[in-house]
Image (cartoon, rainbow, N blue to C red):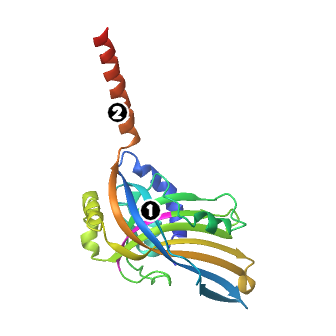
Amino acid sequence: MRYRGMLAMVALSLTSLAAQAEAYDLTFDVTATSRIVVGTQDGAYVESRDQLFQSQRFSYVVHFELGEAIQPPAFSELQGMKLFGAVYASGPSSTSPFTEQVRGALSNLGEPMSSYNMAYYDLYTPASGGAPSYMVAGTQLTLSTDSEWLSTDGNASYMRGIWLTEPGEPAKWDAWTNADFMAFLQARVGQLHQGAYMEQGRSVIGAGAGAIVNDVKIYGDATLVSITAVPEPATFALMGLGLVGIAAAARRRQA
């Protein structure tokens, strides 16, 4: 289990930091390799692999903007987590061939309570009180791209994303600039990251031991194919003004 729900409360507060930032598109080549179904039987979780699942390949694009280093106090206190050299997605990530199917199975999803796309680097070191059970103890660098929806009653959720995680030295990462992060990504173009893609739909009916849980997960391998710089909207506006000026000058010359 990854720590996505915790990030919802900082997603909106960080959006403004992306203004006037360098923007990029990451293009991944994804091959979905498995479909895992989790349900409940006699109060216990039962996980099974879909033996009829057919592998499928698709392109997945994530748009993001480089931002400044930041350390949200709440996260530092609760999880010993630091976001730095962070990047925040300002546009939607691609859907997958399974998105409609996975989301469609969630009858009580309704309109999303929260819907965001974000890509970020985080440095995680276990807090003094110990790491949560779902966190890997130690220090790691993660490029996470996340799209998530939560139902208004909180009983259903959907998410998809790509995670590239590597162990490393905190002191080295802490000194990284945005250029260092881009160099880190460029060095990984063409590399295969097994299990880096996950798409999940989950619903819970009831509570406690009698709760009925339906959980579907699609796992896949991802290869970072390319990194493309994207002109900012302001750049497009300036380009438009420039074209208008050129056209006006041409008309004057013709006159």
- Tell me: 108 left or right of 181: right
Q: Toward the viewer: 229 or 65?
A: 229
**Which image quadrant for residue 242?**
top left
The residue lying at 34 percent from left, 21 percent from top is 247
Residue 137: name its quadrant.
bottom left
Residue in view at x 64 percent, y 88 percent = 46
The quarter of the image holding the C terminus is: top left
| Mark 1: amino acid | Ser
Q: Which residue is mark 2?
A: 239
- Kind of residue at disc 2: Met
Left or right of 174, for residue 95: right
Query: Magenta segment range?
Result: 139-146
Left or right of residue 21: residue 92: right
Question: SS class of the residue under badge 2?
Answer: helix
> Which of the two labelled residues, at mark 1 and mark 2, occupies the earlier sequence position?
1
Looking at the picture, does residue 115 appear above or below residue 171?
Answer: above
Is 13 within the magenta? no
Name the spot of residue 80 as percent of width and height, x first: 41, 74
**Residue 211 visible, this orientation:** yes
Measured as percent of width and height from the top left, residue 215 is found at 63, 77
Q: Is residue 222 left or right of residue 173?
A: right
Q: Which residue is disc 1 drawn over?
A: 59
Whether residue 85 can be seen here = no
Q: Nearer the viewer's eye, disc 1 or disc 2?
A: 1
Disc 1, disc 2: CB below 8 Å? no
Q: Is residue 140 magenta?
A: yes
* Residue count near mark 1 (Cα–Cα under 10 Å), binned few <14, some 14–19, many ≥20: some
- The x and y percentages for residue 143 are 38, 67
